[in-house]
Amino acid sequence: MSGGIRTLVALAAVLAVALAASPSGARVQAAGSLSARDDLESGVLVQINALRRQHGLAPLRINVRLRAAADAHSAAMANGGFFTHESADGTVFWKRIARFYPKGTRSYWSVGENLLWSSPDVDPPGALRMWVASAPHRKNLLTARWREIGLSAVHVTAGPGVFDNAPVTLLTADFGVRR
């Protein structure tokens, strides 16, 4: 890949959470600073909503519960040195998300998830390009039923496990709808 950036992208889309138990190895921090993290997350939201508008879809709005689910998973992957939708204990992603974003008394509930990691970093247009280039990720971005999103970007200076102690930025996008 150009510029010596190694990137892996993964995804899944479906419904309903177990928080990953992770060793306390890597030190999770914002991508440089809290401001950089917020800039990456808000920039990715702007990029996603622009893409959705181009396809006649409703924009997504931030949901704090989906954000909490995304935060927990990004931190678990960064600390635990793994990169997958399943939690460190093998629990499927929708069960992890449901812990934070429950169905409650609603008759309809659905969630999906996009992940990416890049070493050392990624910007909002780059994140969107990677997801759009992957058919399953693109499908998630353009799923009409999604109404809400939670985004979480974390950066570690020396990621353990699959990150080979290299600097890495991870981004989790959790999509959802409840009605």
Image (cartoon, rainbow, N blue to C red):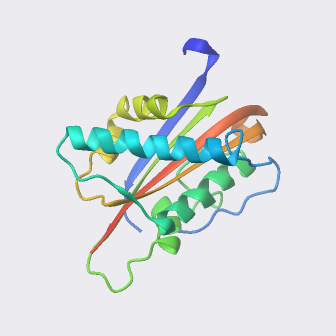
Q: Residue at x 37, y 62 (%)?
A: 176
Q: Residue at x 26, y 50 (%)?
A: 143
176, 89: nearer the viewer: 176
Q: Residue at x 69, y 37 (%)?
A: 162
- Determine the residue located farthest toward the top in the rendered image: 2
Q: Residue at x 32, y 35 (%)?
A: 135
Q: Position of residue 12 (x, y in %)?
A: 41, 49
- Determine the residue located farthest toward the left in the rendered image: 56
- Determine the residue located farthest toward the right in the rendered image: 25
Residue 82 can be seen in this image = yes
Q: Position of residue 149 (x, y in %)?
A: 41, 57
- Determine the residue located farthest toward the front in the rendered image: 35
Establish if 97 lies above or below 174.
below
Q: In which quadrant will I find the N terminus?
A: top right
Residue 137 lies left or right of residue 58; in this view the side is right
Q: How many numbered callouts?
A: 0
Residue 33 lies left or right of residue 25; in this view the side is left
Q: Position of residue 26 (x, y in %)?
A: 80, 47
Q: In which quadrant will I find the C terminus?
A: bottom left
Q: Position of residue 49 (x, y in %)?
A: 32, 45
Establish if 179 lies above or below 151.
below
Residue 92 can be seen in this image = no
